[in-house]
Amino acid sequence: MLKNPFSELKKHEWILWSISMTVVLVSNFVSKDIQLVTMLATLIGVTALIFVAKGNVWGQIFTVIFSVLYSITSFEFRYYGEIITYLGMSAPIAALSVISWLRNPYKKGKNEVKIRHLKARDVVLCVVLTLSVTVVFYFILRALGTPNLLVSTVSITTSFLASYLMFMRNSYYALAYAANDIVLVTLWILATFESLSYLPMVACFAIFLVNDIYGFASWKIREKKQESGE
């Protein structure tokens, strides 16, 4: 499955990727305080989503890189919840997803993961783990003096849910990430009030929202095709 991912992009995917890249680049220059790490994080992040939407394992590889860079930006504003989430959860789960996706291709030699339906025990485990993570990290973030505590806690909840569903190869990962995008847009708008240099992160997650909505639609279409054996 580790083939050149760009060779398989369709015309509408090239357009979506190009628009996404343009928006985050422009937002970096508009901020008048270009942060190289922030700019790289946003560019790699939107690239990751294009390939995740295709069920392509390269999306997970780019997600690992994005998680590291995004954590550096979050550290600068003391968003410890984001650091914990992306370094301690999103990056490791994305790395495990690389293995999971490589082991579960839809068809041998095809750059597309086999989509999975959740069983009842998967749903129960998901709910229990998500609630547990939320409660535990609320107190951790409060002890660390994290700014915008409630929003940061909700971010951890939605991020964990999305990561769990992603690892399970379930199409609803995209809706969980879309919810997380809304939370993160709010979080970084609050940060931008203090420094315009964080504007690119607002643009980044706004674009993430568009891409995750596209990703959900793409996975549902792909899911029906896989079920019909196409």
Image (cartoon, rainbow, N blue to C red):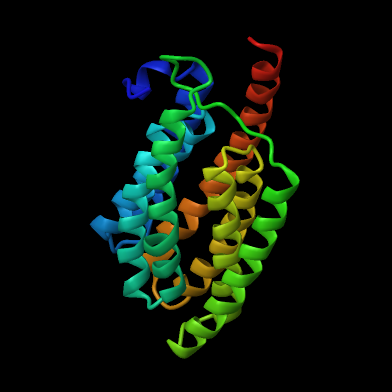
Q: How many marks?
A: 0
Q: Residue at x 33, y 24 (%)?
A: 2
80 is higher (above) or lower (below) than 46: below
| Left/right of residue 217 with respect to residue 21 in the rendered view | right
| Left/right of residue 224 with respect to residue 59 in the rendered view | right
Q: Residue at x 34, y 52 (%)?
A: 41
Residue sitting nearer the eye, 178 or 116: 116
**Residue 163 at x, y percent in the picture:** 53, 51
Q: Residue 152's image quarter?
A: bottom right
Q: Residue at x 49, y 17 (%)?
A: 11
| Residue 73 visible in the shown view | yes
**Residue 224 at x, y percent in the picture:** 71, 21
In the picture as drawn, the residue positioned furthest to the front comes out as 121
54 is higher (above) or lower (below) than 201: above
**Residue 28 at x, y percent in the picture:** 35, 54
Which quadrant is the C terminus positioned in? Answer: top right
In the picture as drawn, the residue positioned furthest to the left comes out as 36
| Left/right of residue 130 with respect to residue 56 in the rendered view | right
Residue sitting nearer the eye, 216 or 226: 226
Which quadrant is the N terminus positioned in? Answer: top left
**Residue 17 at x, y percent in the picture:** 45, 32
| Residue 25 visible in the shown view | no
Q: Residue at x 51, y 87 (%)?
A: 142
Residue sitting nearer the eye, 202 or 70: 70
In the picture as drawn, the residue positioned furthest to the top comes out as 230
